[in-house]
């Protein structure tokens, strides 16, 4: 279920490839993106990883198509990349899952990697990052910096990936302030800056003195900056868009993972598997802290970051209660990876609703 704007496949192919002739390379790699590369968020982070790949492995040419909708158009985009000679395809949105599998069945000699999905095949692997670990850390910052203990969260879609992040963020907030509340407003889009801003303004009007989000643009941060309240970014370091407001962000660092996967292709050691990498891998990180963040906050963040990396602290360890007061994770227990992956309930402290059947 990732993202937005659509230029028709034909137009995109002409824009990206129409006037360019590529020299013979060792390996051609193709990416399809749900948003524009300039979104400053999800797609931007993947494209930085693509550039990192080209820089660190000579002979690799990494092409891309941006703003590709989920569904039939995704299959068309993937096939157009294969037609140019791509032997590895990275499909970087959850909603590309079924299209990727359909195309992969037609091209058994092409390798496919699908980001954030769970369906695999002999030539289809999956990869993602444990962003919830970074969400927990930025939640600690928010818990310290919010004076009112009322925090707003602009959320994209009510799916487990997003719910997991909100829950981890709230657990971090309440690690510092057990009485804090996180108010959630759904935008139901990954990339819609005007709507994101309006959602942020509504939360500020409702009394929130800090705004966090899970969106692909820095619009919520900019709204917070305009109203003089703190904010937390997402996907990439968004501080340049809200230099006074932006405290930190949970961010992606895809480059090293892309390098490792392509090396395995070149070494003929690639195999289909599920990758879910965390803080220890470097795939997920947090952006530099705003100078306004006190030293005691930095020390707390560093302590939990170290514990999580070493496996000595688990974000979803009990006791954890849901927003209705039901004990979901007992003391001494931890959610399994499957339970964390499929999570569709809010922890205590979240004020928001989840549609049924999510």
Image (tube, rainbow, N blue to C red):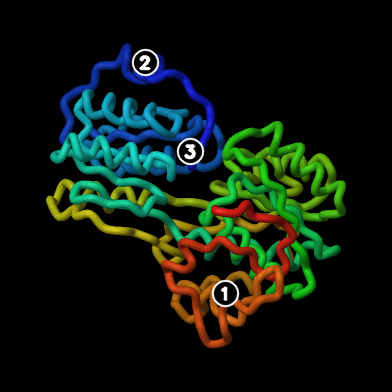
The residue that appears at 26% across and 43% down in the rendered structure is: 112
Residue 307 visible in the current orientation: no
| In this picture, residue 45 sits left or right of residue 353 | left
Circle 2 is placed at which residue position? 10
Mark 1 element type: helix
Q: Position of residue 170 (x, y in %)?
A: 67, 65
The residue that appears at 19% across and 28% down in the rendered structure is: 85
Q: CA distance from mark 1 to mark 3?
A: 28 Å
Earlier along the polypeptide chain: callout 1 or callout 3?
3
Circles 1 and 3: CB atoms closer than 8 Å = no
Circle 1 is placed at which residue position? 304
| In this picture, residue 331 sits left or right of residue 225 | left
Mark 2 element type: helix
Disc 1 vs disc 3: which is toward the camera? 3
Residue 70 visible in the current orientation: yes
Q: Position of residue 106 (x, y in %)?
A: 18, 35
User: Relative to the observer, which residue lies in front, 29 or 331?
Assistant: 331
Circle 3 is placed at which residue position? 43
Q: Position of residue 73 (x, y in %)?
A: 38, 27
Label 2 CA crowd tier, 10 Å (few <14, some 14–19, many 20+): few
Mark 3 element type: helix
Q: CA distance from mark 1 to mark 2?
A: 48 Å
């Amino acid at each position: 279920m990732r993202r937005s704007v659509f230029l028709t496949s034909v137009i995109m192919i002409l824009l990206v490839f129409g006037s360019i002739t590529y020299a013979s390379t060792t390996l051609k790699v193709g990416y399809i993106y749900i948003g524009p590369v300039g979104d400053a968020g999800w797609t931007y982070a993947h494209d930085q990883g693509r550039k990192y790949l080209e820089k660190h492995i000579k002979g690799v040419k990494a092409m891309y198509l941006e703003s590709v909708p989920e569904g039939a158009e995704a299959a068309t985009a993937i096939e157009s990349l294969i037609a140019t000679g791509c032997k590895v395809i990275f499909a970087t949105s959850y909603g590309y899952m079924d299209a990727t599998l359909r195309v992969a069945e037609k091209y058994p000699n092409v390798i496919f990697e699908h980001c954030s999905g769970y369906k695999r095949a002999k030539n289809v692997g999956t990869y993602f990052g444990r962003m919830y670990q970074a969400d927990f850390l930025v939640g600690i910052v928010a818990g310290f910096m919010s004076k009112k203990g009322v925090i707003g969260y602009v959320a994209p879609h009510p799916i487990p990936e997003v719910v997991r992040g909100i829950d981890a963020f709230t657990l971090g907030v309440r690690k510092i302030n057990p009485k804090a509340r996180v108010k959630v407003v759904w935008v139901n889009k990954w990339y819609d800056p005007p709507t994101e801003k309006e959602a942020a303004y509504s939360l500020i009007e409702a009394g929130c003195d800090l705004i966090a989000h899970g969106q692909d643009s820095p619009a919520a941060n900019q709204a917070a900056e305009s109203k003089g309240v703190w904010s937390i970014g997402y996907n990439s370091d968004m501080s340049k868009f809200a230099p006074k407001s932006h405290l930190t962000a949970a961010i992606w660092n895809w480059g090293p993972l892309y390098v490792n996967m392509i090396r395995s292709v070149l070494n003929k050691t690639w195999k289909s598997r599920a990758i879910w990498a965390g803080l220890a891998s470097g795939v997920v990180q947090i952006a530099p802290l705003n100078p306004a963040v006190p030293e005691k906050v930095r020390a707390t963040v560093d302590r939990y970051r170290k514990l999580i990396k070493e496996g000595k602290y688990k974000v979803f360890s009990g006791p954890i209660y849901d927003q209705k007061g039901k004990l979901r994770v007992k003391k001494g227990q931890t959610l399994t990876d499957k339970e964390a992956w499929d999570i569709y309930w809010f922890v205590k402290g979240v004020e928001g609703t989840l549609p049924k059947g999510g």
